[in-house]
Image (cartoon, grey):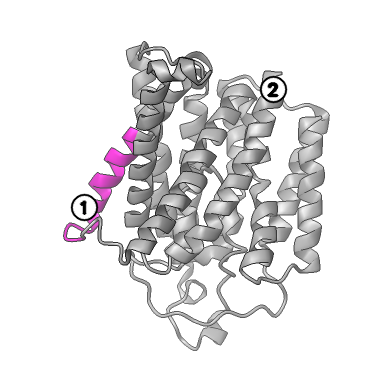
Amino acid sequence: MSSTLGNAMSVACALAWAIGVIIYKRLGEHLPPLQLALLKNLIVLALVTGTIILLSSPAATALGLPALPGLLMDQRSIILALASGVIGIAIADTLYLRALNILGAGRMGVVGNAYSPFVILLSFVFLSERLSALQIVGFVLVLAGVVLVNAPERGQRRKPRGPEDPDQPPAADPAATDALHGHTTGSASQIAQIDPPDIDPAEAGGVDSPGHRDRGRIGLGIALGTASVALMAVAIVMIKPVLENDPFWWVVLLRVGGAVAGLMLLLRWQSPGRRLFQVGPPRRWLVLAIAATVGQYLSMTLWLGGYKYTSASVASVLNESASIFIVLFAALFLGEALTWRRALGVGLTMAGVVCMVL
């Protein structure tokens, strides 16, 4: 029963994350990614705190909700939860954004495919998890589907952009700031189809695009991107035992709290003069609140719940199904073409998900 619940939460997480990506695509045209990441996590911190207050009050019993026990976690579990937020959200996201500036969304989509293999490897070594033969087939199908979804279409072009400001990356970046949280809550690969890959150097006309830079810089971008995905995997595997043994909402609160503390330090270091709460028209706050609630609070809760109730290896692969929802939502709401290659990728990913949950 718990495994079925974990599988369902992992797929539902992918759906919620995909909705968030579509909204963040629009927000990213106005807000720098680091500022957006911190604001989103501050909203989530408030929502998680409110949830804990509700579940700890007599109202929880009246509403038929399970009562939340007090914070009885040992010191080691508390440190692991805080460290998971700092490593998996604050540090990993910062490295990811730097890599994205160098490589562009297309190449980072490919690098992001390493998330599931990293989780599977770490779970094999530290959690003694093993995939069945059918689940290995499912993993291969999901990975193949994600690669097809993220692959650039032949003849696909994108208008060139000028030199990039580290504090204002391409519009798709803010959606990536959850990868994972990860999230991965999602993985980094889920961004490529929203922001198409960069054009070749010759087509860019000398613009300082990722393809025009020397191999050393591209190598640096790949190294940073791989490190960011690896840290996201480390951050979730390290708290898998904590999620299984300690009260869920306290773990979530500590993890988000660690992330907010880390992001505040990074923002103060990178942009000391920036006004954090200056986001523009009031309507943008409403959109940000909706995006943070669905694409961050709900998706992260489902994401961590998936890892609590099923194996980390299976949860990481099921999270990749977000690519299906993103492609479909992008076609429905953003007018993006659903090509035969992406349709095939969606089919392979769906088949892989079925193999993973059987």
Three-letter residue code for mark 2: Ser
Between 224 and 163, the one nearer to me in the picture = 163
The quarter of the displayed image where residue 68 is located: top left
The nearer-to-camera label among 2 and 1 is 2
Q: Which mark is residue 3?
A: 2
Three-letter residue code for mark 1: Trp
Q: Residue furthest front?
A: 62
Marks 2 and 1 close (CB-CB < 8 Å): no
Between 137 and 291, the one nearer to me in the picture = 291
Q: Is residue 271 magenta?
A: yes
Please tell me how crowded label 2 is: few (under 14), some (14-19), or many (20+) other residues with Cα within 10 Å.
some
Q: Which residues are magenta?
A: 257-274
Q: Which mark is residue 269?
A: 1
Q: Which mark is residue 45?
A: none
Look at 73% across and 59% down and name the residue there: 148
What is the spatial separation of the Cα atoms under label 2 and label 1, in whole angstroms? 42 Å
The quarter of the displayed image where residue 59 is located: top left
**Mark 2 or mark 1, earlier in chain:** 2
Please tell me how crowded label 1 is: few (under 14), some (14-19), or many (20+) other residues with Cα within 10 Å.
few
Question: In this orientation, does residue 36 appear?
Answer: yes
> Residue 25 location, x and y as percent?
50, 63
Q: For numbered disc 2, what is the local secondary structure?
A: helix
| Residue 350 falls left or right of residue 3 | right
> Residue 177 location, x and y as percent?
44, 51
- Relative to 99, residue 141 above or below: above
Between 110 and 182, the one nearer to me in the picture = 182
Q: For numbered disc 1, what is the local secondary structure?
A: helix
